[in-house]
Amino acid sequence: MDDTDNGRSGYYREIARAFLERRGGGFFLSPKDQAAIAAWEDKKIPLGVVLEGIGRTFDDLKARGRGTKAISLAFCGRQVEAAFAQHRDRLAGRRKAAAGPRSDKGDKARHEIEKAIEALAGDDLAMKRLLGSALEALAAPRPDAGALERIDAEVEAVLWARATAAEKAAAEAEALKGAKGRKSAGFEDLVRRRVVMAARAGRRIPHASLHYY
């Protein structure tokens, strides 16, 4: 990914990161690939479903012994649509089987964020403030997606600032392996994403954006 991706949504960045890591090679998306992400977002295909479709595509190519360097993101469209159809079928099945009201994404996000706040150290005021702001935004009848993404960006900035030199060096080493030792355009952003993702997982800091639920 290049510098122009800094203004993109978390949804866009996560899909681009996952695809480029699986494909290898360059660190940018073609206009056709960018249009594919925009179409999936317009259709409200959940982020996890898109990532599932991308993973299926590359797993299938690997099983058939085919190379991946020339594969476009748009090529993953068939598997993304298949995963989305299965996702809708699963939701329909759960709705029929549920005895009570079904929790929505907002409920799930609030639950995860509340757990994270309880687990935070008492003096971690910065993270508590950000997660508290996320709870306030999620309490609205129609949560502001832009506000939630901005909170996620601020959380990532805090996690990056707190990362140790050793954590950054380890992430850079892993990124270099995937890039075959070359630092192409967007390499620093890739390292930052690795560090932040590891910090979120290790410190159990959930996302605020509903794209992740």
Image (spheres, rainbow, N blue to C red):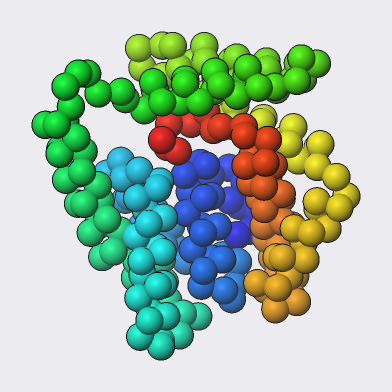
* x then y, percent, for residue 19: 49, 63
- Which image quadrant is residue 107 in? top left
Q: Residue at image x 54%, y 66%?
A: 20
Q: How many labels does the image show?
A: 0
Residue 94 visible, this orientation: yes
Whether 85 is drawn above or below 123: the answer is below
Left or right of 20, for residue 129: right
- Which image quadrant is residue 204 in? top right
Whether 157 is drawn above or below 121: the answer is below
* x then y, percent, for residue 151: 60, 26
- The image quadrant where one finds the N terminus is bottom right
Left or right of 199, for residue 43: left
Residue at the outermost left position:
96
Whether 45 is drawn above or below 191: the answer is above
Residue at the outermost right position:
165
- Which image quadrant is residue 164 in? top right
Q: Residue at image x 65%, y 22%?
A: 119
* x then y, percent, for residue 207: 54, 33
Residue 35 visible, this orientation: no
* x then y, percent, for residue 15: 47, 54
- The image quadrant where one finds the C terminus is top left
Q: Residue at image x 70%, y 65%?
A: 175
Q: Residue at image x 50%, y 26%?
A: 112
